[in-house]
Amino acid sequence: MTAFFDPQRDLEIARVIKAPRERVWEAWARPDLFARWWVPAPAQCRVVEMDFRPGGALVTEIRENGGAFGPHMQACYLDIQPNRQLVFTTALIGNWRPAADPFITAIITLDEDIEGTAYRAHVMHKSPDDRDMHSELGFMDGWGSVAAQLARLVEG
């Protein structure tokens, strides 16, 4: 799946991760690994559900400052191409059910690179206002931090 980048409604980060695509993919596909990098440290992530298939649910919780875990994300996988690409959205929850608060659709692409894996996260929003809000909330810092955490996990 490819999607045209709309600068009015989309945000994107890209970086090279010095690890094979299979290792990066595994960190997306295994709940125990995913929880280690999905939220910016020092916050912690807990994977409540990861039904890694199209139509499957992805539900995470977050804990900050040593407090209790609380809601973070409810999403649905739309497309999974092993070691290549995955697409998920918060417009749906598991089993293709409509979500109460849709916000993003993300296309994560892993391509071969001479140094390892060319990693790209293309995040689409329904409106320019939602895109701007996500940007102001710190998209580049947040998604950039978790991409760096992912890289540290798989490069080791």
Image (cartoon, helix red, strand yellow):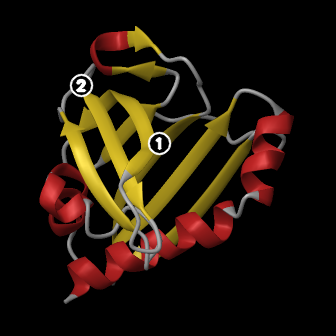
Q: Are marks 2 and 1 in contact (CB under 8 Å)?
A: no
Give the quarter of the figure containing the C terminus: bottom left
Where is residue 60, by image quadrant?
Answer: top left
Residue 85's x, y, as percent?
33, 45
Disc 2/disc 1 C-alpha distance (Å): 16 Å
Closest to the observer, 131 or 5: 131
Name the spot of residue 52 as percent of width and height, x first: 18, 35
Kindly identify which numbered label has been placed on residue 56: 2
Q: Nearer the viewer, residue 6 or 11?
A: 11
Residue type indicated by callout 2: Gly
Q: Residue at x 19, y 28 (%)?
A: 53
Q: Residue at x 73, y 58 (%)?
A: 137
Q: Which mark is residue 107?
A: 1
The mark total stands at 2
In primary-sequence order, the first of circles 2 and 1 is: 2
Instruction: Tell me if residue 33 comes above or below residue 86 in the rendering.
Output: below
